[in-house]
Image: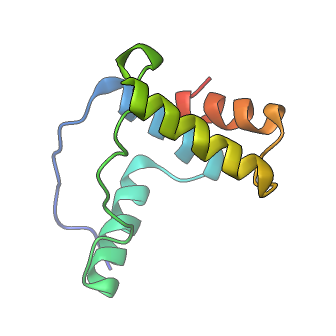
Amino acid sequence: MAKSSNLYIRVEPDVKEQAEKVFNGLGISMSNAVGLFLKQVVINQAIPFDLKLAPSKIKSFDSLTEAELDTEIEKGFTDYLANKGRPVKEVFSDIRKGLGV
């Protein structure tokens, strides 16, 4: 089907640049990527990914009350006893990914 409509959008320059790098790596253009997104919207009759609010920020140590700190320490100790811990390298790797580092 021949393309017959233009779509003009505004996006933050750094987001556009980062997305272009991803699309270049995939071998598709920004235009093709947007077209794929719109086709998925039509096929699914919905946005093709979950929309969620960002998780609330973790409170800093200084902002915790004594009771909140005790609760957090207790949770950590309970997880430790239940062998729910994770290796430090894995945790810091996830943190770096989340920060884009």
Left or right of 19 in this view: 15 = left
Furthest residue toward top? 62
Q: In the picture, which quadrant includes the N terminus? A: bottom left
Total marks shown come to: 0
Left or right of 6 in this view: 39 = right
80 to 18, vertically: above or below? below
Q: Residue at x 53, y 53 (%)?
A: 28
Say if residue 72 shows up in the picture: yes
Say if residue 58 shows up in the picture: no
Residue 96 percent location from the top left of the image: 64, 28
Residue 51 percent location from the top left of the image: 31, 61
Left or right of 71 in this view: 92 = right
Q: Residue at x 41, y 13 (%)?
A: 62
Depth check: give the residue in front, 44 or 66.
66
Rendering quarter of residue 97: top right
Q: In the picture, which quadrant includes the C terminus? A: top right
Residue 49 percent location from the top left of the image: 39, 67
Residue 77 percent location from the top left of the image: 69, 43
15 to 39, vertically: above or below? above
Q: How is the image coloured?
A: rainbow
Q: Residue at x 17, y 56 (%)?
A: 6
